[in-house]
Image (spheres, coloured by chain):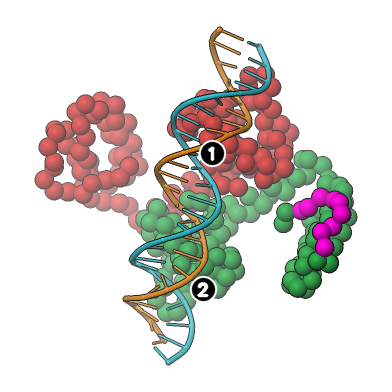
Chain colours: A green, B red, C orange, D cyan
Amino acid sequence: MEMQQLRYVVAVARMGNFSRAAEHCHVSQPSLSQQVQKLEEELGTRLFGRMKREAVPTAAGQVFLTRALRILEETDTAQREVREAKGPLRGVMTVGVLPTIAPYLLPEMIRRIPQKYPGVELVVHGGYHQPAGGHAAGL
Amino acid sequence: MEMQQLRYVVAVARMGNFSRAAEHCHVSQPSLSQQVQKLEEELGTRLFGRMKREAVPTAAGQVFLTRALRILEETDTAQREVREAKGPLRGVMTVGVLPTIAPYLLPEMIRRIPQKYPGVELVVHGGYHQPAGGHAAGL
DNA sequence: TAATATTACGTATTACGTAAAGATT
DNA sequence: AATCTTTACGTAATACGTAATATTA
């Protein structure tokens, strides 16, 4: 049982079918299908019925889903608590982004970064040139 | 954050050092060390101090450990509940084992199988020949 | 120097994507 | 026919083991 498999299963339950779950998870749909099958094999039970164009959780799937959700919440909690134990993050985050794709990435980024790291100043470079200094950020 | 990494971290905390944790997890000690490092890098914090010949959890390590333990418990619970949702397992389990290694494997097996699957009849073939029929069991 | 942890590197597992086939409405 | 899922298979990422190096008592 792997974390990704739990995310995939939860996504299938929330989206209602494998295709939309796959694009929500940013993986190809066969890959997601494989991972769900693998988990089902490990558990010895089908988690979803795939008959009528929508993925419906089986009885086993329902009890598993509640646990999977709790596990994923716990992982988020663990990461948050570790961050808090480290103390607040401070400094300047410099990000370079091509003007071509900026409209797709920037709004989400400008919304989430300050929310998650209140002490961090966000600097965005928009041109095609290489920014002079600062630290790159992996997101 | 992967499930194995959580098991490794918990093992290190329980065993007190990386070497014993590794043999407890049946992996080489460098592999376990790599995985713990990888998790620490992802979290952005050391989870253990490795100074004095024993691995002592840091402050961040302690808060993480309690969450990791709960997550592992939840995975066990999830698997158990799915088994229960399937209904009790019944039938005959046939196992072949070489007399050479039987003394090492049989006692553990005879103790745990009926405990975990009360409805299953366990048949053990001890010779060097191939058993006639029945189903092989992967444990 | 004995015991433990890390680094380096090659190998084997496996998760993934693309393409094709099967199934359902 | 259109949409969704599974199978097949090659590729890429990665977890692992062995060997060598570093660190600590």
Question: How many discs appear?
Answer: 2
Tag 1: Cα neighbours inside 10 Å, few (<14), some, or many (≥20)? some
The disc label shown at residue A19, or none = 2
Q: Are marks 2 and 1 on the same chain?
A: no
- Say whether residue A125 is visible: yes
Which image quadrant is residue B13 in? top right
Q: Main secondary structure of the magenta part?
A: loop
Residue drawn at (69%, 38%) of the image: B63
Q: Please say if the residues under marks 2 and 1 sit with CB atoms less than 8 Å apart.
A: no
Is residue B14 at all visible to an observer of this figure?
Answer: no
**Residue under the image location 57 percent in, 70 percent down:** A23
Viewer-nearest of discs 2 and 1: 2
Residue A52 x %, y %: 42, 79
Q: Residue A106: image x %, image y %?
A: 79, 68
Q: Looking at the image, which residue is at 78% across and 44% down?
A: A84
Q: Which mark is residue B7?
A: 1
Taking the image as shown, residue B61 lies to the left or right of residue C10, namely: right
Query: Pointer 2: residues within 10 angstroms few (<14), some, or many (20+)?
Result: some
Query: What residue is rendered at 67% in x and 31% in y?
Result: B48
Range of residues picked out in magenta: A129-137
Q: Does the stretch in magenta take in A86?
A: no
